[in-house]
Image (spheres, rainbow, N blue to C red):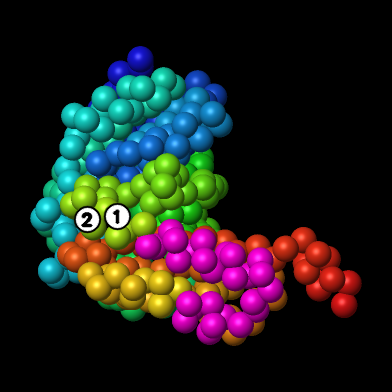
Amino acid sequence: MHRPTVVSTVSELRQAVAAAHAAGKRVGLVPTMGALHEGHLSLVRASQAQCALTVVTIYVNPSQFGPGEDYDRYPRTLQADLDALDTCGGESLVFVPRNEEVYPPGYATWVEVGEVAEPWEGQCRPGHFRGVATIVLKLFNMAGADVAYFGQKDYQQVQVIRRMVEDLNVPIEVRICPTVREPDGLAMSSRNAYLGPESRRQALLLWNSLCLADELVRQGCRDASIIREKMRERIESVPDARIDYIALADPDTLRPVDQISGRTLAALAVRIGNTRLIDNRLLELPEKNVARKTQT
Ligand code: AMP
């Protein structure tokens, strides 16, 4: 067990990171909103494997929640989070800022990312990525870490952050880590805490429909609209499920594809009762199709 140090001001954070850098240590950053689960901890472990100091930030960022979303009821479990971080072992520093530290009076600067931020979450949650890009850039600037770790679970978010880092010449390396799932396949999420037993069972639909898409591609289906339709049918078989979007897209640009001709991202957002869940999966063409395609 290695009790992490907790700081709440930017100056304490900067001091600790400067000391680590002065000692020749590589510094990793894992931004989170807390209510930590194995998905978050996998990012912490990835950072600890590559960096001598890991900064974990725990901050429920108000600017990425829209009106009527779950900012007020978002789970806040700091003590349990610190206990969970204890079990990770390596050297970590936890940054838990207050709202006034992040958005002091007079705050007026926002980061807007273009194309990759527009569809899907961008359309369903107006202003969400403006809040995300802004807080992530602020955390990058506050911490001055060398590398930052994000989960594939929030695929579009990672693309938005990568775009921002490239466009704004932010001196940090961005790493993406695989989605950690419950044994039955449900992607771990802090919002799973909202699910009652029946909704929890229904939530498995997201992963089921992504597996169905994968299966269809393996069987030779290449028509994206057919795959989307089958996914839709699967999800709508549960009366409490409401689809926000189902997308099949190029994994880099997030532009929709009509035909599956290479690695394709399947992504979706579904509401189960009051709980909005997202998930995604990269669909791979069977080996022989890829080989044939590169030959032609
Ligand atoms: P959040 O606390 O939901 O803002 O997530 C913080 C970071 O953890 C983001 O980079 C997420 O993509 C990542 N994350 C959340 N859930 C998972 C998961 N199930 N597997 C891997 N990473 C995750």
Q: Classify mark 2 as within 8 Å of ligand 1 or not, answering yes or no.
A: no
Within 10 Å of the Cα at label 1, are there few (<14), some (14-19), or many (20+) other Cα atoms? few
Residue found at the far front of this picture: 237
Amino acid carrying label 2: it is: Glu
Residue 180 place in picture, x, y as percent? 44, 44
Within 10 Å of the Cα at label 2, are there few (<14), some (14-19), or many (20+) other Cα atoms? few
Question: Residue, x 45% and y 37% (percent of image)?
Answer: 42
**Nearest the camera: 270 or 253?**
270
Quadrant of the rendered structure where residue 263 is?
bottom right
Tell me, yes or no, if residue 139 can be seen here. no
Q: Main secondary structure of the magenta part?
A: helix
Location of mark 1 (residue): 201
Tell me, yes or no, if residue 176 can be seen here. yes
Identify whether 146 is placed above or below 162: above
Quadrant of the rendered structure where residue 2 is?
top left
Residue 155 place in picture, x, y as percent? 46, 60
Identify whether 211 is placed above or below 196: below
Question: Residue, x 50% and y 21% (percent of image)?
Answer: 23
Reply yes or no: does residue 224 show up in magenta: yes
Q: Are marks 2 and 1 in contact (CB under 8 Å)?
A: yes
Q: Secondary structure at mark 2?
A: helix
Location of mark 2 (residue): 198
For the C terminus, give its image quadrant: bottom right
Residue 208 place in picture, x, y as percent? 44, 61
Residue range in magenta is 205-230
Identify whether 251 is placed above or below 48: below
Horizontal relation, residue 206 to residue 47: left or right: left
Question: Residue, x 45% and y 39% (percent of image)?
Answer: 43
